[in-house]
Image: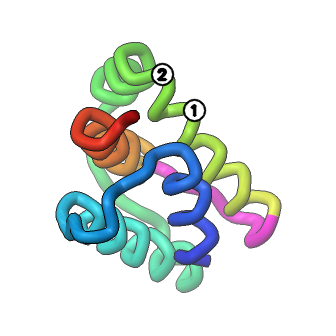
Amino acid sequence: MMREMMEIIENKIKVPDKVAYPRDRLITNIKHLAIRLLSEEPLHGRNDLELYHFVKTNYPDEYVLIDKVNQYIEETYHCSMTEEKIYLTLNVKRMNDLYAL
């Protein structure tokens, strides 16, 4: 699951092999997401709709990329991200800012 999610993201954003951060942070976030999804444990958070709309509106390319990851999860594992979309989108935005071609 984690490998496939990383492939979807890294097919869009090429991070140099020698660079650990922010790839390590992304891997950690995906690892926690995978554990939560496989354990079927719901995420209980703030459900911050303002932040969600801000991220979706201001970082549309990154949001669409994370939505592709979510589609993969839904199709393959029949579950879906919740607030993780916000955090992963922000992480991918950071990667994109640092390493976009």
- Closer-to-camera residue (70/100): 100
Asked if residue 78 lies in the magenta stretch, the reply is yes
Prevalent SS, magenta region: loop
Q: Residue 57: give x, y in percent of width and height.
A: 42, 15
The residue indicated by pointer 2 is 60
Does dot 2 land on a helix, a strand or a loop? helix
Asked if residue 14 lies in the magenta stretch, the reply is no
The residue indicated by pointer 1 is 64
Name the residue rendered at 35%, 26% in the picture.
55
- Closer-to-camera residue (74/42): 74
Q: Residue 70: give x, y in percent of width and height.
A: 62, 52
- Closer-to-camera residue (72/61): 61
Does dot 1 land on a helix, a strand or a loop? helix
Residue 53 falls in image quadrant:
top left
Placement of 39 over or under 100, stated as above or below = below
Residue 47: tell me if it is visible.
no
Name the residue rendered at 57%, 32% in the picture.
64
Disc 1 vs disc 2: Cβ atoms closer than 8 Å? yes
Placement of 13 over or under 36, stated as above or below = above
Q: Residue 26: give x, y in percent of width and height.
A: 33, 62
Name the residue rendered at 42%, 68% in the picture.
30
Residue 46: tell me if it is visible.
yes
- Closer-to-camera residue (16/46): 16
Range covered by the magenta-colored residues:
76-82
Q: Is residue 49 left or right of residue 94?
A: right
Name the residue rendered at 24%, 70% in the picture.
18
Q: Amino acid at mark 1?
A: Val
